[in-house]
Image (cartoon, helix red, strand yellow):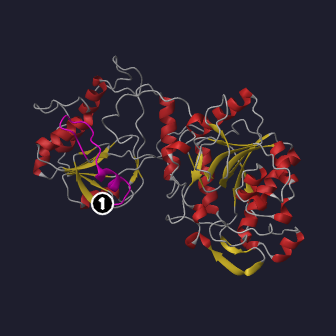
Amino acid sequence: MDDPQSYPDEIGPKHWPGSRFTHVMKLRQAALRTAREKWSDYILFIDVDNFLTNPQTLNLMISENKTIVAPMLESRSLYSNFWCGITPQGYYKRTPDYIQIREWKRRGCFPVPMVHSTFLIDLRKEASQKLMFFPPHQDYSWTFDDIIVFAFSSRQAGIQMYLCNREHYGYLPIPLKPHQTLQEDIENLVHVQIEAMIDRPPIEPSQYVSVAPKYPDKMGFDEIFMINLKRRKDRRDRMLRTLYEQEIEVKIVEAVDGKALNTSQLKALNIDMLPGYKDPYSSRPLTRGEIGCFLSHYSIWKEVIDRELEKTLVIEDDVRFEHQFKKKLVKLMDDIDHVQLDWELIYIGRKRMQVQEPEKAVPNVMNLVEADYSYWTLGYVISLEGAQKLVGADPFGKMLPVDEFLPIMYNKHPVAKYMEYYEPRDLKAFSAEPLLIYPTHYTGQPGYLSDTETSTIWDNETVSTDWDRKHSWKSRKQEHIQSNAQNTDALPPTTSLGTAPSRDEL
């Protein structure tokens, strides 16, 4: 068959005119015909941008003993490779079952009206002989779309499609809009790769595929620091690979291990807890893990001062990156430079704690707000002046967790008695909106681990804490923010995109 590089009626490489649908359906039909001619027992269809990460996927699908069965694939949204509902006109229909299956609230192998992208056909089943991708069935009158045409063919053949989510099988990207570019397609695939690495080994390219080299850079920052405990090699390896895939160059900072701190070391550093401090959820005092975390960030602030770094990015080793992270952060910093905003700290990842009213949008800079009370130090940009203010506050003799210290320094902590120990409190703090990084895991999720909360009390190494499993509300996911408290003024105006796409759950 011909392999056209473009189609005369397309508006771009991601546009699907009728001619492209026809070409894909003919390719699938040719593959199906070849499999039948070879007396194959099965044929597995996989879209080129789908990633199967479970090596047992094929065996697992065969064991289901269905004529058409698909493994549920994951994406960065609710989008997947199946529908749970279809209208009489052949369009996508939203149903309650979809969320239950997509989020693994129900597990099993479910009858559905549509599977696509990756699926297995059992050619031993007699009914499979009636299946066709092209031409469409003689009674077909729905929209001309390859996945809908095949779903109709399956229905006319009396074959029920099935979707399985018993295990994690792999990933697929979110479809792009017709006007989007091949570069955006590449960014989409890179994000699929880095999402897959959060809980599983990296998706490695075939030894038979030539991969273009990557050229990491510092995104315009003077330095990018990544904090990592030496004993957390798994996190370090994942982050380095994730950053490399995004072409981001970092310097690893070996974190201060709270478990290795002893009383003599704390005394030598003149460390004392801020009088009266208690964790806001568990009422416990400071832990040595939190001291280690503070010292890790403090060492970076000191290096920023010593090297006179004007613009520095700091990230921790347990973060997940938003789609197009690099492009979005570079654009944000360019916009900030353009308006000559006087800033000293910019959160790119945090847990917003003030959720009663919106934060103040920054004039003439989209996606930026003045930061209110926040938790977490997942990632932030800091200026030389900001580092000087934080170090100049002399925090060792009145220490509290670093994510409580920062809001004090920009005068937004809700506990007034804590703020009394720090003067001045004039750090110029802002936050990306929406955020650009998030935690990889939250309290209660498989894989969640805290090195700050699972530790010992700061002044008594015989008293252990295990707050990550019992009391760590601080590490839970961001609470729902009511519509009247959303930071909508910081977002660009939305444009009308018409009705929702007919072939996805976006």
**What residue sits right under mark 1 in the picture?**
60
Magenta residues span 85-106
Query: Which amino acid does the dot numbered 1 rest on?
Result: Leu
- For this rendering, which residue is in front, 147 or 485? 485
For this view, does 313 lie left or right of residue 422? left
User: Is residue 94 rendered magenta in the image?
Assistant: yes
Q: Position of residue 428 (x, y in %)?
A: 77, 42
Q: Is residue 499 visible?
A: yes
Q: Position of residue 186 (x, y in %)?
A: 50, 35
Kindly identify the residue that appears in the image at 74 percent across and 71 percent down.
288
Q: Is residue 28 visible?
A: no
Looking at the rendered image, the quarter that the N terminus falls into is: top left
- For this rendering, which residue is in front, 83 or 58? 83
- For this rendering, which residue is in front, 126 or 360? 360
The answer to which quarter of the image holds residue 151 is top left
Q: Secondary structure at mark 1?
A: helix
Q: Is residue 423 above or below residue 133?
A: below
For this view, does 44 lie left or right of residue 278? left
- For this rendering, which residue is in front, 125 or 82? 82
Kindly identify the residue that appears in the image at 62 percent across and 45 percent down.
244
Main SS category, magenta section: loop
The answer to which quarter of the image holds residue 368 is top right
User: Is residue 320 rendered magenta in the image?
Assistant: no
For this view, does 47 lie left or right of residue 223? left
The mark total stands at: 1
Kindly identify the residue that appears in the image at 42 percent across and 54 percent down.
53
The answer to which quarter of the image holds residue 295 is bottom right
Report crowding for label 1: few under 14, some 14 to 19, many 20 or more residues within 10 A (C-alpha). Answer: some
Looking at the rendered image, the quarter that the C terminus falls into is: top left
Q: Position of residue 199 (x, y in %)?
A: 50, 58
Q: Position of residue 321 (x, y in %)?
A: 57, 47
